[in-house]
Image: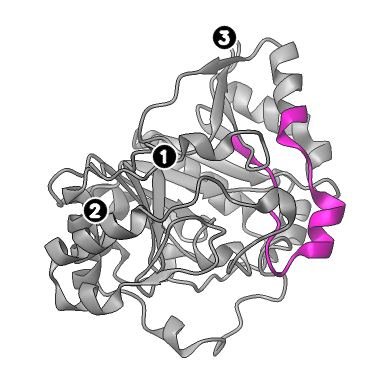
Amino acid sequence: MLQDNFGRRFYYLRLSVTDICNFRCNYCLPDGYQCGESIARENPLSVAEVDTVVRAFASLGTEKVRLTGGEPSLRKDLVQLIETAKHADGIRRVAITTNGYKLHSEIDAWQRAGLDQLNVSIDSLDPQQFQAITGHDKLEKILRGIDRALELDIPTKVNAVLLREHNLAEFNHFLDWVKVTPVSLRFIELMRTGDNRDFFASNHVAGSDIENLLLRSGWEQVVRSRDAGPAKEFAHPDYAGRIGLIMPYSKDFCASCNRLRMSAQGALHLCLFAEQGIDLRDTIADGDHEALAEQIRAAVCGKDASHQLASGFTGATRNLAMLGG
């Protein structure tokens, strides 16, 4: 089992398959993806290399793989990537985080390939506000895609970044939606990155304020599975869906960390806000998953106890599209 020096075990790999994103979310890529920022970004891990990565992590006890971006659906071989992850011995669950741009047209193919879980980013349920945040008038199309995923019985989570000036006033609208829609809606605290200092200062909302509101309204926290993400999840008997809170600024947030990240170029990131990734591309390209597993095991021993977000340290993370958040 993959374990660090603080006794944390890592059942969950977040694997970025591209840095490119076609949305222009105001908290992440307000100017859109900048082509040519890095030549390396034009050379993401191939299907064969993803197979090596997933088999290495699976041999170390990882049970869940989430394909992220950028926007993973921009990969024309995404179906093959899902199949590759699903077929690795020991992997119980394959998930995707997407902006939903291609969801309605592709979700059936993703399910046939072995997709077990879906996360969709929707930062507003108001079409005009959604367009203002993302740069795209696609909300209704994305909601139809979610409806189709639910028809296919795919467990679906919806991610909404809390933004004081853009969607906080919609909180009750979100609750009304969850009352009749069987999704897990996760509110994510806006995180400081290298590119969003001023935006963070004017838009950060403490997740603890939302937690207190939920508890006062009869919501109760539910137990997390061992390969679950970092969200505290809450249920209410009168609601079809659930509410999750991801609060990276909360006390002891990192104590239950169970996930590692691999960039689209084969760099292992021990934390989203680490100083830099550990370049493992050469070993990945060799196709030797056992050698890669040993490198991963050795690297994890150097994982810090916690990020330093509260001190304003964001490491190498310029924006959340780099590693899928």
How many other residues sit within 10 Å of disc 1, few (<14), some (14-19) or many (≥20)? few
Point out the tag, 1 or 2, that comes first from the N-terminus: 1
Any magenta on residue 213? no
Q: Amino acid at mark 2?
A: Phe
The numbered dot on residue 237 is: 3
Q: Compared to 163, does 22 lie above or below?
A: below
Q: Which residue is mark 1?
A: 6
| Residue 313 horizontal/vertical position (percent) | 68, 60
Point out the tag, 1 or 3, that comes first from the N-terminus: 1
Q: Amino acid at mark 3?
A: Pro
The numbered dot on residue 189 is: none
**Residue 13 visible somewhere in the drawing:** yes
| Residue 246 horizontal/vertical position (percent) | 60, 38
Identified at 51% across, 31% down, the residue is: 183
> In terms of depth relative to the viewer, which is nearer, 167 or 49?
49
Find the magenta span and give its range: 186-209
* Disc 2 and disc 3 in contact, CB within 8 angstroms: no
Q: Amino acid at mark 1?
A: Phe
Q: Quadrant of the C terminus?
A: bottom right
| Residue 87 horizontal/vertical position (percent) | 15, 51
Any magenta on residue 189? yes
Q: Which residue is mark 2?
A: 57
